[in-house]
Image (cartoon, rainbow, N blue to C red):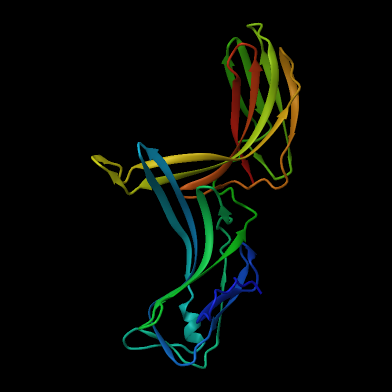
Amino acid sequence: MYQPELELGMKTFTISLDKDQYSVGQTVNGNLSVKINKTIQLRDLIFLVRGTESVKFYIAMGHHSIKYSNSDCFFKQDLTPFMITAGARIKKDKKLEIPVHIQNIPFNFVIPNDVLESYNGKRVGMTYEIILRADRSWRRDVDEKLEFCVISGHNLGSVHNQGLIEEEMTQSGVYANMCLERNTFSPGETLKGTLTIENFGGKEIRKATLNLQGIESGIGISEEKIGLINRKNEEREISKIIETYSKDIEFNNDGTTAFEFATPAKAKKSYKGKFTEYFWTLGVKMDIKLEPDLYIRTRLICG
């Protein structure tokens, strides 16, 4: 049974689950262990499961750092009825009374089919947790939390499969065109495409490199004001490269060459939430002697 390590001393309440990872559509079975030696009463009780999308990052401004954050609770279910079923009672003053004989409160819930996978990124996250909070008169308040992982076979949401895609650019007398069969791939799948070069400037192209990158992105809102500059409610988007895979490829200095790129078997699946997303790009960087690199790339979805 999945259960976090207990802190020193006896805890009144301990949340546990039958395992630590679930697929969408599965039923989660858990238990709330109660260790009391007399009947207790709880005020302002919160016992629920929720899924939350969040983003948090800091932007330097002079000698200060401004915090940007955002969150959205996309899944929530009240678990309090399971306490009533186990024998707890709601008093007239709305306090919840737990009799001394109650030692275990089993509960369960179903993970919806349309939620996104768990993700713990650098600045963004998709978190699932069970929360128990309550006030206790003349005692330490209850504040317990247990996270669990959700995996999904479909994180693409409303993203459209575009089929054949092309990107092109002309720079320093060199034209380059990258063509891919489609804009989606599965982890471990081999991407196939072509690179077309028209070197009408007669430049020396020394190398062509494919770069596959996984990128997380999020939109945060500032709640701060610094001096006379009011940054409150300012919206800011930030992106960070999380994964990078590179491969040098053969190329025709003035023609078309086919290429293949084996994607990693453990590539993070793309997702698009309300404020955050994870996506991939595939690009070709061409090293041109005595000229800036020519770089073209296109956006991909891993699912």
Task: Between residue 239 and residue 61, name the one nearer to us.
Answer: 61
Residue 149 vertical position relative to residue 157 in the rendered view, above or below? below
Question: Residue at the location (39% across, 47% down)?
Answer: 67
Residue 250 appears at what percent x and percent y? 76, 22
Q: Is residue 300 left or right of residue 11?
A: right
Q: Quadrant of the N terminus?
A: bottom right
- For the point 61% across and 70% down, which residue is it? 27
Residue at the limit of the structure toward the left, as seen here: 228
Q: Is residue 159 visible?
A: no
Q: Can you see residue 230?
A: yes
* Residue 168 percent across, percent down from the top left: 60, 21
Q: Nearer the viewer, residue 26 or 145?
A: 145
Horizontal side of residue 141 vs 227, given as left or right? right
Give 71 or 67, whichever is nearer the viewer.
Answer: 67
Residue drawn 52% across and 80% down?
A: 11
User: Could you tell me which residue is drawn at 67 percent across and 45 percent down?
Assistant: 267
Q: How many marks?
A: 0
- Toward which corner of the image does residue 297 lie, by quadrant? top right
Residue 117: percent from the left, percent from the top? 59, 55
- 68 is higher (above) or lower (below) than 253: below
Image vertical order of residue 243 relative to residue 50, above or below: above
Whole-percent x, y for residue 42 in the image: 39, 82
